[in-house]
């Protein structure tokens, strides 16, 4: 049974929050554990992209060959998201999360010691599938265990995992580049991941019990207040919902096409277009996810002003298209600083949409849909964009140059605008 946020009076909500401050909140602990697991998983997910320039030089392979490895990852991750989204409610969250993170850690350790480049894509394929279990299971767990008052906090917190994990591994990779040992970027998540998976096993039962107890107490308060807990079903239009989910899936492809495309290839762009060293180009790329940490909070505030998810996406993609136009100009005149600033802003905007689609939407819709399923499905489509970004953008750059890559991204933004127009026309017809 779900609760409408509006059904809780401010007095009751504040009273419950004050009570939680005086004790160890189970909700806080379960949110922290989910945040820690997913943040650490990102260390063993984007470390390949963070060191792709070193990998190209070390194995003497082309950009498209190097980009094929993360393409295998994103392919498995995207399909796994959908499959595991469907099955997430049947999984034992405790052991699924432990197994996923532990296997990923072992894979990273194997890559750290192997010199066989042909093996990398298959290991990264397995890594992609096992890590695809995490997001739908964690979101489903949060939607199941958290009181209504903690949903917004959990959404904001989980939205920072991607940015913080990316910042950490890119920062460390820059240091490892200076000491000329990029393989440490694979040892690091391998060791930390095993430790965190053990912490998860140790604290999970206590965190879930306390959080579920707090949620049950909240439900009892609502019952005593005799509020209408079914109010959130009002205004539900299944046809509009299906169309909006399809539109969000399409937007999700574009979001990660841009976000992960920049994260993967910006070090190479800075090296090739501006002759920067590997360590400097990697370090400068860290600024992209640093700013993106605030993307989730921004998405939440904008969502309150623009409740329609598709319109929200349309406005942000329009801004991205304009800024990418400036980036193209910077490439022509070789303005490195302005280009880097624009890349940071684009990454911030794309990251905010990623949080909107994969975190805010499924958690806030928990009373109407299976949060785990839609979190997995939407994240799966996001990683379809990641798949295209790794190999596809590398191929375009290799044959047509980096300017063509950015024109391609603008074209996708235009496609989102067309999708939004079609969505709005459909709503007018249905209503």
Image (cartoon, helix red, strand yellow):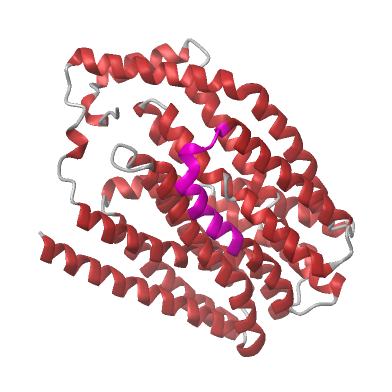
Tell me the quadrant of the picture where the C terminus can be found.
bottom left
Q: Total of numbered circles in the picture? A: 0
* Residue 116 percent location from the top left of the image: 87, 66
x, y percent for residue 338 = 57, 70
Q: Is residue 142 above or below residue 357?
A: above
Residue at the image position 19 percent from the left and 39 percent from the top = 233
Residue 43: x and y in percent read 69, 48
- Residue at 75%, 37% (x, y): give it: 194
* Magenta span includes 403: no
242 sits left or right of 142 in the view? left
Closer to us: 178 or 145: 145
Determine if residue 157 is in view.
Answer: no
Stretch in magenta: 75-93
Residue at (64%, 49%) from the top-left corner?
130
Q: Residue at x 73, y 72 (%)?
A: 66
Residue farthest to the bottom?
A: 400
Residue 339 shows in the view: yes
Q: Is residue 199 left or right of residue 251?
A: right
Magenta stretch, main secondary structure, is helix
Spot occupied by residue 213 in the image (x, y as percentages of width and height): 43, 16
Residue 126 located left or right of residue 120: left
Q: Quadrant of the N terminus?
A: top left
């Amino acid at each position: 049974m779900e609760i409408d946020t509006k059904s809780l009076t401010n007095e009751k909500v504040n009273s419950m929050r004050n009570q939680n401050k005086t004790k160890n909140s189970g909700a806080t602990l379960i949110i922290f554990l989910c945040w820690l697991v997913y943040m650490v998983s990102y260390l063993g997910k984007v470390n390949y992209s963070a060191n792709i320039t070193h990998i190209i030089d070390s194995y003497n392979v082309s950009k498209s060959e190097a980009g094929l490895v993360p393409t295998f990852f994103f392919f498995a991750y995207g399909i796994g998201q959908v499959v595991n989204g469907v099955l997430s409610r049947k999984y034992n969250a405790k052991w699924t999360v432990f197994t996923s993170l532990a296997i990923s850690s072992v894979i990273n350790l194997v890559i750290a010691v192997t010199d066989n480049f042909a093996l990398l894509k298959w290991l990264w394929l397995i890594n992609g599938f096992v890590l695809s279990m995490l997001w739908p299971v964690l979101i489903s767990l949060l939607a199941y265990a958290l009181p209504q008052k903690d949903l917004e906090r959990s959404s904001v917190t989980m939205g920072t995992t991607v940015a913080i994990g990316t910042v950490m591994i890119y920062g460390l990779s820059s240091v490892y580049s200076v000491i000329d040992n990029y393989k440490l970027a694979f040892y690091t998540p391998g060791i930390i991941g095993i430790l965190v998976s053990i912490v998860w096993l140790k604290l999970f039962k206590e965190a879930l019990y306390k959080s579920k107890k707090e949620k049950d107490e909240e439900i009892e308060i609502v019952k005593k207040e005799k509020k209408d807990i079914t109010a959130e079903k009002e205004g539900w239009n299944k046809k509009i919902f299906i169309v909006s989910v399809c539109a969000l899936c399409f937007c999700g492809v574009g979001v990660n096409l841009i976000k992960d495309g920049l994260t993967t290839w910006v070090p190479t762009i800075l090296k090739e277009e501006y002759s920067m060293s590997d360590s400097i180009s990697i370090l400068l790329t860290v600024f992209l996810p640093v700013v993106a940490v605030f993307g989730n909070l921004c998405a939440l505030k904008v969502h309150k002003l623009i409740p329609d998810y598709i319109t929200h996406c349309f406005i942000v993609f329009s801004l991205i298209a304009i800024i990418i136009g400036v980036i193209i100009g910077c490439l022509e005149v070789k303005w490195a600083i302005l280009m880097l600033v624009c890349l940071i802003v684009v990454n911030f905007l794309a990251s905010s949409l990623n949080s909107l689609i994969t975190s805010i939407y499924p958690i806030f819709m928990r009373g109407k849909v299976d949060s785990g399923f839609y979190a997995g499905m939407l994240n799966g489509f996001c990683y379809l964009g990641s798949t295209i970004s790794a190999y596809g953008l590398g191929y375009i750059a290799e044959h047509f140059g980096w300017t063509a890559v950015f024109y391609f991204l603008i074209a996708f933004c235009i496609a989102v605008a067309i999708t939004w127009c079609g969505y709005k026309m459909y709503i007018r017809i249905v209503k």
